[in-house]
Amino acid sequence: MKDMTATAAPVIEAKGLNLVFQTNDGPVQALKDVNLTIGKGEFVSFIGPSGCGKTTFLRCVAALEHPTGGTLTVNGMTPDEARRKRAYGYVFQAAGLYPWRTIAGNIKLPLEIMGFDRAEQDRRVEQVLELVELKGFGKKFPWQLSGGMQQRASIARALAFDADILLMDEPFGALDEIVRDRLNEELLKLWARTGKTIGFVTHSIPEAVYLSTKIVVMSPRPGRITDIIDSPLPRERPLDIRDSREFIEIAHRVREGLRAGHGDEV
Amino acid sequence: MNRVLPILTVLAALVAIWYAATVMMNRAWVYDQAARADTEVSFAEMVPLTMDQERPVLPAPHQVVSELVKSTLGTAPTSKRSLVYHGWITLSATALGFVIGTVLGCLLAVGIVYNRAMDMSVLPWAIASQMIPIIALAPMLTAILNTVGASPLVTKAVISAYLSFFPVVVGMVKGLRSPDAMQLDQLHTYAATGRQAFFKLRLPASMPYFFASAKVGIAASLVGAIVAELNQPAGLGARLLQGSYYGQTVQIWATLFLCAILAALAVMVIAAVERGTLTRMGMAR
């Protein structure tokens, strides 16, 4: 697997990435010397405590933050060029659907902005609604849907313009565990069907291990990578894989990585 | 019925207090007349005499209602004695002033949200403009507008707009800034242009704020139009002033009530448009 990603051109590549925020309390090192290569079709999770820079890294990839040092390329371009070429779909922590638009209208939002014609918009809306299992809900308004369904709609919106990269910032963080399990399962299916490269920020060890082909463990002050784990789990993953020995071993290694990051903090 | 009963109770209490006040305020005149005629009036004789005076200090409710009915329904709308005639003049100035004020308010709000220099400078001026009593400013504006040849309607509309733009600016600035950082970041990830961000996010998000401001704005417009009419030949403001010149308290009160009714109707019209718009947008539940 490692060889596969090494030979293909990397989708996201960070070399010696640094980001220092200037705050009123002086400079804060949000990212320190981050090196990471993500290949096409990988599912990469970023895990770590608050302030470890996992969201910041994702935002750098999306060109929502600008690194102060090192290099970062997305599809071989600068993040800003990639953003203007609509190389990625971004799913935020909150669904952020517009209350004045129907679910279909919300999914059309990026399509309207990007200038797809009407017939194509309708076709794509139907397609992604089916992909996130919300077929038939297009005419509903957001408040008529549960939190889990709203978050699925926001994933559909990020998928609608069919970017190769999907960046997800704790998309299921606000949902209860049962809904979360279901959405995780659906997300894996969606990933298998679309073959997208996914960057996924999470607080949850089981979620990270269950979903990812690669787990990036990060620690705070300064935000940095403490471990990168290539998962030996197969791509096909039923929910009960979480009781297998391999799963538990990876989860253990992630926990160790988090603890090590915490240890040298003081 | 459960909702009507409390309203009627409050109304009945207000009318009762009003009648009591009528007796209190107008009895001096009754006793005065009696003293001049060298007669005595008992309390029971005095009370009815306070209810039907031609120039009472405080007219009784039924006097005001009958004057209101007489001067609206009982008089030809073309007559200068008709409150419909005067009301229409005021209402047209209010409507024009409201439109001017709202458009100006929205434009200023857009400027404040998008232009840093305007953001730093416009609002203090807008607030200062509202500190000047309109009653002092109206005659000057009228004089200036007269010399540049503006019609009375336009003159009144400008003064009316002067009052109504302010709530619209304040509300629209808040409304256009209501989208959070996440929503703006999201549009950034779509590489949306500033224009798209305005029409697809900021403007629709500001609609509830707009209607809240518009309700305040239309009431302010009416006040502005009435004040502007204090030096005009026709309109509710002119009618109020004439009433006070000639001590026609019944006429003044009837006109005041018509002003209040018009203000309530105007706000109700805005509320109906609000309901319609927000329902169409899917924002009313």
Image (tube, coloured by chain):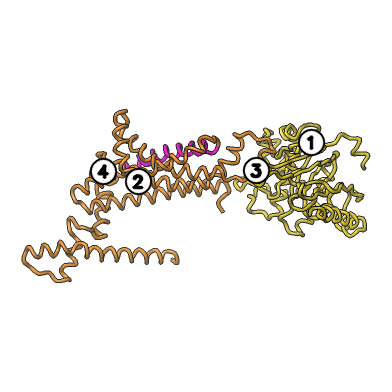
Give the amino acid type for the residue marked by disc 4 in the picture: Ala
**Which residue appears at 67% of the width and 54% of the height?**
A145
Q: Nearer the viewer, mark 1 or mark 2?
A: 1
- Disc 1 packing (10 Å; few <14; some 14–19; many ≥20): some
Span highlighted in magenta in the image: B90-113
Chain that bears disc 4: B
Name the residue carrying label 4.
B238
Q: How many marks?
A: 4
The vertical placement of B41 against B159, above or below, is below
Where disc 2 sits, the SS reads: helix
Marks 2 and 1: in contact by CB < 8 Å?
Answer: no
Is the stretch drawn in magenta largely helix, strand or loop? helix
Q: Which residue is mark 1?
A: A70
Task: Mark 4 vs mark 3: tell me if same chain.
Answer: no
- The C terminus of chain A appears in which quarter of the rendering? bottom right
Instruction: Using the rendered view, name the quadrant where residue B182 is placed.
Output: top right
- Judging by the rendered image, the residue that carries numbered circle 3 is A105
Residue B95 visible here = no
- x and y percent of residue A113 in the render? 66, 35
Q: Which mark is residue A128?
A: none
Q: CA distance from mark 1 to mark 3?
A: 40 Å
Q: Nearer the viewer, residue A121 or A205?
A: A205
Q: Nearer the viewer, mark 3 or mark 2?
A: 2
Q: Nearer the viewer, mark 1 or mark 4?
A: 1
